[in-house]
Amino acid sequence: MAAKSSYPSEYPSSFFCSPLTIAQLIDVLNLLKSCHFPQARWHELGLTLGLHKNTLDVIEKNHPGDVSRCFTECLSKWLSKADNVHSKRGATFDSLSDALKSMNENAAADKLDQEKRKAKAIEIFNTHHPLLSQSLSDPVSVAIMLQREGVITGQVLASVESASPSVPNQREVLLAAMREVIQNKYSLLQTFASVLCKFTGNLGAVIQRDYDRYLNDDKKLIKVMIRDDDSMSTDASSTESTPPRVPTVEIAIPQCMSDEFTSIQTSYGRMLYNIRKIIKKEPPPLDDVREYLCCCRSSLEPKLSLCSNITEILRAVEKECSLINVRLLQSLVEEFDIKEAEKLITEYKGILKEFCRTVKISLCLNEKFEALGGSPSLQCETVTYVFDWEPDEHMLQDIKQIISKTSGKLVKIKYIKKGNSIIVTCSFPHSLTGALIMKLNENLELLMKNGLMKLTVGYCTIWKKQKVEIYVVLSV
């Protein structure tokens, strides 16, 4: 059972999931005002929420010209469940949000949704606060990484450090600051979880699990990722509903190619679905599967410890897969000799290999190439290449080959973006920072020959092309 936190939220999570009452009139009013809903549309809002026209006409007659009062009385009638409110899903946050969307008040509806997510993020944080306040063994190191990631300010870091030598005091200062940060930007709860995974793996994984369950919209999407090896895959979307951590990024696909791109995503979904069915029909021993996966990828151990059945284990494996890498899934089915699944993977890899041979970078600009449901990469685990390329002149395979040659097997592509150049953002395990920098330094000349303009690893710029201005002096 979740412990009651000493940190109250402006709007408790229950406000957004329980029926509303007249006692919450001021909360609803304040929420709609903060969302900039135009009060002049109160009459239309009332009709949309299920109030009768006669009821609204009486309100207008009793308060002629007083828009604010009419708006208040309209909401009061709605919260009192007058007229046909029950037929419109009752007086609930969701019915209010639906009404705003049907009126094309999308900005206000989005703001309502953000408030709902913020409240849920605070609830998740508060749920884990008692354990955090007892088990966070090195709050200063956590604070240092959070500050470098831009989550907390230098002033907050100084406050945590000045609370020394009392570790409990350091924890309390840090957690109080984190709650305020999450209150302002709920998605930073996920970054906090990612940082915690570097220090207290299980606790960070549990917070990330809760974030994925309630606040991660990626399960509604089909995302794509490229890794620097020869295996291939895509992530099919789940039908589970969760709120977006970040807005969906549109893929710039020419109309003539959209069917092909969709076809590949569908092929992956079909493969994944059928592999699930095959494995669930005769599942290998869970302990053997866990042990094997931990040997293959030790970073999965905290997540696997939370899995109670083969379906949950498969989901954890799928999150490690991507558009051009199903190696972990393939390794699993090979180890346990699941021939039918092996055949499905081989067929899918053939389809995707042909696609990757022909698709151009321009089809993938501004698309996130990362596994579903995973934590966002921390800056300290990010490497960014800036190339002086034109998208149409280079194929997707070019990026894969250059990144693979210069970084070995240390990074995976996360994002490709077009500005005045092509920006390729990759991620890597923090523990491999030193090895990656050495590898990149060894191959810097090759990168430069391929149009490298800038290279950053973590918080440091490794190399940047300098502009050279040539002045020509003419003699008279």
Image (cartoon, rainbow, N blue to C red):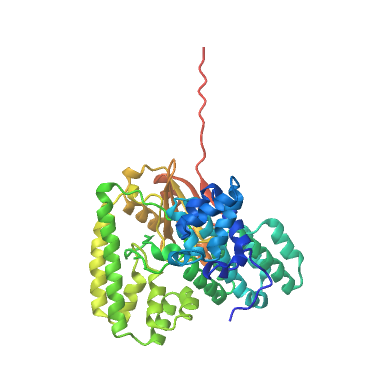
Q: Quadrant of the N terminus?
A: bottom right
- How far from the left and from the top, in percent, is residue 63? 60, 50
Residue at figure coordinates x 50%, y 72% from the top left: 209
Residue 278 at x, y percent in the picture: 27, 79
Along the line of sight, the residue nearer the viewer: 309 or 352: 309
Left or right of 138 in this view: 458? left
Q: Quarter-wise, where is residue 221 in the image?
A: bottom left
Residue at point 64% right, 63% down?
10
- How many numbered circles does the render carry? 0
Q: Nearer the viewer, residue 193 or 11?
A: 11
Choose between 186 and 43: the one closer to the eye: 43
Q: Residue furthest top?
A: 476
Viewer can see residue 110: no
Q: Give how far across and how far down residue 49 sits, in percent.
A: 47, 59
> Taking 303 as reference, is 133 left or right?
right
Q: In this view, does 355 lie above or below 344?
A: above
**Can you give x and y, in whole percent of width and height, for residue 384 in the image?**
48, 53
Residue 72 horizontal side relative to residue 413, left or right? right
Residue 183 visible, this angle: yes
Name the residue rendered at 36%, 56% in the picture.
Answer: 400
